[in-house]
Image (spheres, coloured by chain):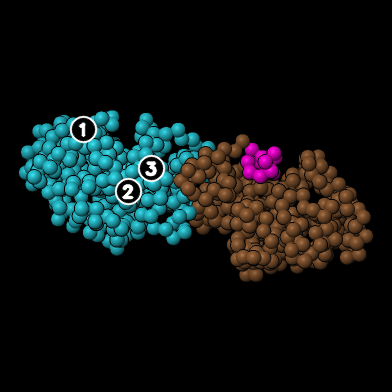
Chain colours: A cyan, B brown
């Protein structure tokens, strides 16, 4: 059994490789829901959907988010009405949010709704939201108010300086059914190459998850989302720097030292391997940039081998 | 100033004729909201939208509801997810519901949201929901439970026998801003050829509306939606019969006798004109079936002439 902590695109890419070398039924991804939002009355779970669409082979690889063959009829009509359209909801994608919102209104917990959606599109693997309770990532700007995650990430295109981040609701939420068991049972626990601050951060803030990782630290392998001092995608590097952490693999190692026994860093950062190991993590240097499914498969093998070599 | 009480398609057709002979700025339609529903988290106002789309020239005349050039990408995707798709929401139409739901969540009352939508699509005339407070038409079936209007109308395609109808929330709701003034100020008040039970019924149940009509009864002209003992569209005839009212123009006259001074009936019902007049209504016999905009324009002229002739 392989259990992964997952954010959005980077995680989805790694998982797409992982399910090529491990039977899908043996893979559980515990997914960040701190990005979730309600827009136009619809409950939107960007990370769950990104992982779902990618594992179902429905994602748009070129655009990097959303569904392949997507159309934008509703958004265009919404713009003509003067509605807020900064968060782009494609016509096909809307169906996911309509379905989820209806089921949540029916009283189904998010984990059950996620099970239904992933079964309907056929991803094979198991996806668990980190919690059925709402947790909302909120960011206080250096010169401004506290704003919701999507306001920061999409509307302002993460081009504003952040003073602090919090995960509202995390301290009182409960891990979704199956989450802590999946962490206890995982032969390998993967921290995907997602944003350590706003993708993995909320996961670690859910009561019980960080403890579960600490207890099984030797089986926890993190993949650095920072390569050569920069995030491959998104604001992880800037956020880390703004919050006082070096935006390097060493900074990533500092953030994960308590919960992960191994950090996989890119060849480009080989010179920093000793600094990572000095923080008490086993360090593996390998190609980590996933441009193709083959890249993702190779990186997945690296991750799994890390534990069998390390634990055995 | 012309004020109309309006349901959905029949009302929209008449109004489309009316705005050809009266400046749009002099027309106010007070629209039934008893059909409104929340589906997939979205607030849907079918009658408001039908009138809006029709007056904006955006409606699909052939299908008889919804928008011209509509696409169904979201619905098809929702069906693949196993979601409820009996209430067909087109991609363009979805934008209206997304917009409305967001604005209501922002705290805007429905009358303000309606003003925004009708201004954005440019209908010229003024549309008022009958109330900013939720009123919900509910029907108790002869052999079954009480169900919501759209469950009856769309999901079961009004093919079940109804024992009773009520308008939940009507007794405590307030007429939306402008409604009672529009009734007090209207030179002519038109009761559109909508379902007397479930379209006009909710309007008359809003506190103040029926009283306002009674006070200006000589200026109130109703158009019968029943022609030759049958509804032109929908279940008005069956509903009337089930509730103990003859499904004829005489039955319509009975339902409207207190609030309308004039009833326009179709040529096909000319033989019943005396029976209508015996109930105390002035009866006008004219072509009432609107197959074209020209038909609607002619019927509108009939309606307006009824009052100028009657009141003068």
Write the residue at 81% across / 46% down: B289
Q: Are marks 2 and 3 in contact (CB under 8 Å)?
A: no
Dot label at residue A298: 1
Task: From the top left corner, tell me how far across and down residue A263 is, in percent.
Answer: 15, 42
Asked whether residue B236 appears in the rendered view, the answer is: yes
10 Å crowding of disc 1: few (<14), some (14-19), many (20+): many
Write the residue at 40% across / 50% down: A116
Most foreground residue, B79 or A218: B79
Q: Mark 1 to mark 2: distance in Å?
A: 22 Å
Q: Mark 2 to mark 3: distance in Å?
A: 11 Å
Q: Which residues are magenta?
A: B53-68
Residue under numbered circle 3: A122
Residue under numbered circle 2: A127
10 Å crowding of disc 3: few (<14), some (14-19), many (20+): some
Chain for numbered disc 2: A
Write the residue at 13% across / 34% down: A285
Dominant secondary structure (helix, strand or loop) of the stretch shown in magenta = loop
Most foreground residue, B263 or B145: B145
Callout in the foreground (1, 3): 3
Task: From the top left corner, tell me how far across and down residue B179 is, in percent.
Answer: 69, 59
Chain for numbered disc 3: A
Most foreground residue, B36 or A29: A29
State left or right for residue B64 relative to residue B296.
left
Q: Earlier in the sequence, mark 1 or mark 2?
A: 2
Q: Is residue A250 above or below residue A139?
A: above
- Examine the structure image and report whether residue B61 is included in the region drawn in magenta: yes
Chain for numbered disc 1: A
Asked whether residue A160 appears in the rendered view, the answer is: no
Find numbered disc 1 in the image and state the secondary structure of the residue it sits on.
helix
Find numbered disc 2 in the image and state the secondary structure of the residue it sits on.
strand
């Amino acid at each position: 059994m392989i259990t992964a902590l997952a954010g959005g695109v980077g995680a989805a890419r790694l998982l797409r490789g992982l399910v090529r070398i491990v039977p899908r039924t043996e893979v559980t991804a515990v997914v960040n829901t701190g990005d979730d939002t309600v827009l136009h009355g619809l409950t939107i779970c960007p990370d769950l959907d990104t992982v779902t669409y990618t594992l179902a082979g429905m994602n748009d690889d070129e655009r990097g988010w959303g569904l392949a063959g997507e159309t934008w009829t509703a958004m265009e009509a919404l713009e003509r009405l003067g509605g807020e359209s900064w968060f782009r909801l494609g016509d096909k994608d809307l169906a996911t949010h309509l379905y989820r919102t209806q089921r949540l209104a029916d009283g189904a917990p998010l984990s059950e709704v996620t099970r239904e959606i992933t079964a309907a599109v056929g991803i094979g693997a198991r996806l668990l939201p980190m919690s059925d309770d709402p947790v909302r990532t909120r960011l206080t700007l250096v010169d401004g108010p506290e704003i919701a995650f999507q306001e920061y990430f999409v509307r302002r295109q993460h081009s504003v300086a952040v003073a602090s981040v919090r995960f509202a609701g995390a301290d009182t939420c409960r891990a979704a059914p199956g989450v802590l068991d999946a962490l206890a049972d995982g032969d390998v626990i993967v921290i995907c190459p997602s944003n350590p601050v706003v993708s993995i951060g909320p996961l670690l803030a859910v009561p019980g998850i960080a403890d579960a990782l600490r207890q099984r630290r030797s089986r926890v392998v993190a993949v650095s989302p920072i390569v050569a001092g920069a995030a491959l995608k998104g604001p992880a590097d800037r956020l880390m720097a703004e919050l006082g952490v070096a935006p390097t693999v060493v900074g990533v190692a500092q953030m994960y030292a308590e919960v992960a026994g191994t950090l996989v860093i890119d060849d480009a950062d080989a010179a920093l391997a000793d600094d990572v190991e000095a923080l008490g993590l086993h360090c593996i240097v390998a190609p980590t940039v996933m441009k193709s499914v083959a890249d993702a498969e190779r990186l997945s093998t690296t991750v799994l081998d890390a534990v069998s070599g390390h634990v055995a």
